């Protein structure tokens, strides 16, 4: 009796594996599919090739005047000549180290707090929320021996970051209080919070900024010359805290009722219940929402151009109006778009990463 | 501590009802004080500056022109009229934006789950790029970069000598009503009524007998048929007013401002990325078992989408969709940055500068957006109740 020797399995046909198999399955699975593939490739080709040759191949990168832009492609000289203005606005040049140091410290704190493996998170968080804001204020504005630099000289990307960060940091506690108020059992508190939240969420940020710049001065005794940046910030914080309140409310609602009842049964007071039991759990659910709010706030800060503050978009707009550099709006706006995109995209990736990391399997 | 040992005051202090009443009264008092202070300050400040309050300014003549007016308007009309002109312009761009963004968004959303790898990746890149760039920047880009490449009026792009595109906008022929126009309108209204009746009848028949009726195509046929045949039966009740190049620009016809186009494109593209994601997650939220059940029942692909998947996906999609529409309407206020005459630009901009009535004008503008928000969210709540799963 001969032993049964199975033949080795035949390899899959060449059309089913490797690049060809993949392409057949994903690109040419049917005639309409193949048509779509060819069409998209054609469109992509006809858009990307001219764009890339304009932006990179034929572009001018070095120089100092518009006379250096001769090759017919993008004139990135426009950006490089004014790069400092786009970053710092009219901040005095010999003090650039101050915003630089502020943001290096910020990045240090962010790394400390956002990378899970680094220990002492609690100390980091406390330092970041107490010492850092004071330090940043002194560094950016002045005082304690540093030259005072009034806020109307701030501008560029620095101003964008300042607005977005202050907006979010101040909005979080207000948002938490509003959200708690909205779920309160006291009808007056609930009503006040609901009206506050729905009011700010119902109107466009522009009208809020208009309000902050023309109406707010009337609200204070003789406060007609309040700082322009301060007024914009008040508007942004109001707007942002209403959105933050809804994020927090989402987090609170996601908690099971048993947590509230358990805390009550243990005899915890309202604030103990909230700060020791409810909020620590809700925070985990809220973090992606907070990051998303930060992204939209970051994009929305560009609206302050309309009330005359010069963030990065405003600085570029001003540079475009310079008679010496007329005719480079595409370069200018693409540069701003790219800057915003880098920030927003990395934040959204981080939010997705967090969502996956914090998903402890309790998702229903 | 033994509760009996407490005296009256501390008992009151530990009584939840009393505490809550006290706390609420405190908050109300503080709020009232805050509001009174602000009102007082505003009054003193206004008095010092010699600004009179009240809405009397609304009936004064405006004295400025507006580049796009959907209702009759010129410099002699009142400031109140500018409010409505601006409001209508806001509603126009929001309406156009909602329609286009939904259309584009649905295409993007479906592309993101397409079996075609290329399409999937391209739509992903589209969403990831355009969602992460501020809307204002996109508006600027369309207005100052893309639309500036259009030719000057003299070298306009022309389509059949009736549609012209140049740097000043798009010029379309304008239908002008002629004799018999009201009869034609009546005919069109009748056809719409017929379509509604047909839909109700078809739904009832499907419920009773299970038979389907091609409502969509029949409706299209009825509407188009009435529009075309009725046009000739009533003796061509409209003539077209063609735009003509006179001097430096076109006259006559309908002018679509470049500001409107830039704003419309930017709003559409920006919002479509969000709508695309909503559509994708809506369709993905319908469990795969539904698809398998459809195949088991022998329901074909088109019917599966239309009768099984979409109705279930809709329930997930409608609430975020409505809030996107609301966002689009609110974002249309960015018009003021490029000078499209919307509510904020005309009323909270020019009118405010001319009259100085900051409080009245900003409040009116905010009230408009608030009213729209409240109306939409009321609709959304009603809709949610209607489509919510009835759980037992």
Image (cartoon, coloured by chain):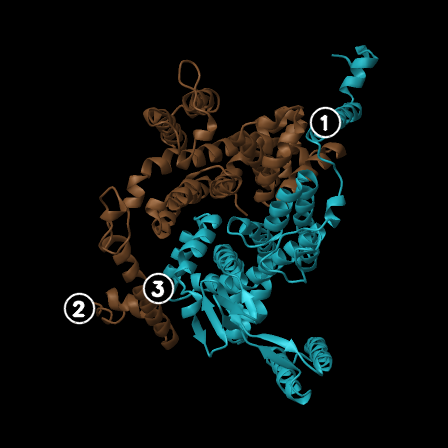
Residue A319: where, in percent of width, then height?
A: 38, 43
Q: Is residue B313 visible?
A: no
Query: What residue is shown with label 3?
Result: B118
Q: Which chain is brown?
A: A
Find numbered disc 1 in the image and state the secondary structure of the residue it sits on. helix
Find numbered disc 3 in the image and state the secondary structure of the residue it sits on. helix
Callout 2 and callout 3 share a chain = no
Q: Residue furthest right?
A: B8
Find numbered disc 2 in the image and state the secondary structure of the residue it sits on. loop
Marks 2 and 1 sit apart, C-alpha to C-alpha, by 108 Å
Residue A168's disc is: none
Q: What hue represents chain B?
A: cyan
Residue B44's disc is: 1
Task: Kindly identify which chain the residue marked by label 3 belongs to.
Answer: B
Asked whether the residues under the numbered discs 2 and 3 touch, taking CB atoms below 8 Å apart as contact, a structural biologist would say no
Q: Nearer the viewer, residue A162 or B116?
A: A162
Q: Give the mark count.
A: 3
Instruction: Identify the residue at image location x=63%, y=32%.
Output: A216
Q: Please indicate whether residue A197 sits to the left or right of residue B130 in the image.
A: right
Residue A255: where, in percent of width, then height?
A: 59, 39
Callout 3 and callout 1 share a chain = yes
Q: Please indicate whether residue B123 sits to the left or right of residue B16 in the image.
A: left
Q: Nearer the viewer, residue B276 or A80?
A: A80
Q: Nearer the viewer, residue A257 or A275?
A: A275
Residue A3's disc is: 2
Among the two numbered marks 3 and 1 on one chain, the one whose residue lies closer to the N terminus = 1
- Pick the quarter of the image with the C terminus of chain B: bottom right
State the image quarter where residue A194 is shown: top right
State the image quarter where residue B43 is shown: top right
């Amino acid at each position: 009796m001969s032993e049964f020797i199975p033949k080795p399995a035949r390899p899959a046909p060449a059309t089913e594996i490797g690049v060809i198999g993949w392409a057949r399955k994903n690109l040419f699975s049917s005639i309409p599919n193949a048509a779509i593939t060819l069409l998209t490739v054609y469109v992509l080709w006809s858009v990307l090739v001219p764009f890339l040759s304009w932006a990179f191949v034929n572009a001018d990168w070095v120089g100092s005047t518009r006379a250096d832009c001769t090759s017919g492609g993008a004139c990135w000289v426009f950006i490089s000549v004014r790069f400092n203005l786009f970053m710092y606005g009219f901040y005095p040049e010999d003090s650039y180290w101050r915003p630089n140091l502020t943001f290096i410290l910020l990045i240090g704190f962010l790394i400390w707090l956002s990378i899970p493996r680094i220990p002492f998170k609690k100390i980091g968080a406390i330092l970041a929320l107490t010492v850092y804001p004071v330090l940043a204020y002194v560094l950016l504005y002045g005082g304690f021996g540093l030259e005072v630099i009034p806020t109307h000289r701030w501008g560029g990307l620095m101003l964008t970051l300042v607005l977005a960060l202050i907006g979010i940091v101040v909005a979080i506690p207000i948002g938490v209080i509003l959200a708690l108020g909205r779920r309160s059992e006291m009808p007056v508190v609930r009503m006040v919070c609901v009206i506050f939240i729905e009011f700010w969420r119902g109107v466009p940020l522009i009208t809020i900024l208009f309000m902050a710049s023309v109406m707010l001065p009337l609200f204070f005794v003789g406060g007609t010359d309040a700082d322009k940046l301060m007024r914009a910030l008040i508007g942004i914080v109001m707007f942002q805290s209403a959105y933050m309140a809804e994020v927090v409310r989402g987090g609170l609602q996601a908690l099971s009722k048993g947590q509230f009842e358990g805390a009550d049964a243990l005899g915890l007071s309202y604030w103990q219940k909230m700060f020791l039991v409810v909020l620590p759990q809700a925070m985990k659910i809220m973090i992606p929402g907070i990051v998303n709010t930060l992204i939209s706030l970051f994009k929305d800060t560009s609206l302050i151009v309309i009330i005359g503050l010069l963030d990065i978009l405003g600085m570029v707009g001003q540079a475009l109006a310079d008679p010496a550099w007329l005719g480079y709006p595409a370069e200018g706006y693409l540069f701003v778009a790219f800057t915003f995109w880098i920030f927003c995209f990395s934040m959204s990736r981080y939010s997705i990463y967090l969502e996956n990391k914090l998903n402890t399997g309790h998702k229903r | 501590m033994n509760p009996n040992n407490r005296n009256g005051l501390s008992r009151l202090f530990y009584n939840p009802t009393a505490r809550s009443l006290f706390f609420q009264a405190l908050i109300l008092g503080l709020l009232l004080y805050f509001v009174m202070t602000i009102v007082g300050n505003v009054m003193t400040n206004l008095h010092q500056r010699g600004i009179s309050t009240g809405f009397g300014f609304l009936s004064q003549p405006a004295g400025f022109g507006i580049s796009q007016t959907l209702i009759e308007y010129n410099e002699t009309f009142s400031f109140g009229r500018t409010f409505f002109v601006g409001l209508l312009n806001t509603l126009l761009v929001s309406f156009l934006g909602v329609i286009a963004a939904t259309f584009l968004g649905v295409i993007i959303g479906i592309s993101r789950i397409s079996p075609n790898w290329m399409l999937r990746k391209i739509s992903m890149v589209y969403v990831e790029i355009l969602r992460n760039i501020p809307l204002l920047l996109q508006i600027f880009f369309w207005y100052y970069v893309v639309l500036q490449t259009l030719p000057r009026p003299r070298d306009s792009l022309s389509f059949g000598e009736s549609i012209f595109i140049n740097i000043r906008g798009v010029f379309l022929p304008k239908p002008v009503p002629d004799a018999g126009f009201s009869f034609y309108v009546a005919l069109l209204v009748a056809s719409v009524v017929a379509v509604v009746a047909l839909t109700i009848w078809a739904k009832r028949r499907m419920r009773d007998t299970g038979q389907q009726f091609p409502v969509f195509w029949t409706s299209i046929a009825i509407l188009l048929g009435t529009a075309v045949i009725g046009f000739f039966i009533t003796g061509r009740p409209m003539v077209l007013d063609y735009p003509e190049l006179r001097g430096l620009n076109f006259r006559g016809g309908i002018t679509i401002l470049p500001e409107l186009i830039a704003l419309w494109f930017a709003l559409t593209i920006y919002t479509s990325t969000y709508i695309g994601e909503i559509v994708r997650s809506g369709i993905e939220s319908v469990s795969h078992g539904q698809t398998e059940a459809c195949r088991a029942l022998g329901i074909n692909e088109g019917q599966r989408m239309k009768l099984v998947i979409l109705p279930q996906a809709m329930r997930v999609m409608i609430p975020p969709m409505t809030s996107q529409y609301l966002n689009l309407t609110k974002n249309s206020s960015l018009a003021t940055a490029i000078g499209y005459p919307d509510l904020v630009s005309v009323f909270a901009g020019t009118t405010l500068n001319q009259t100085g009535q900051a409080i009245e004008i900003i409040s009116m503008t905010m009230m408009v957006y608030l009213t729209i928000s409240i109306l939409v969210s009321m609709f959304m709540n009603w809709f949610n109740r209607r489509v919510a799963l009835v759980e037992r």
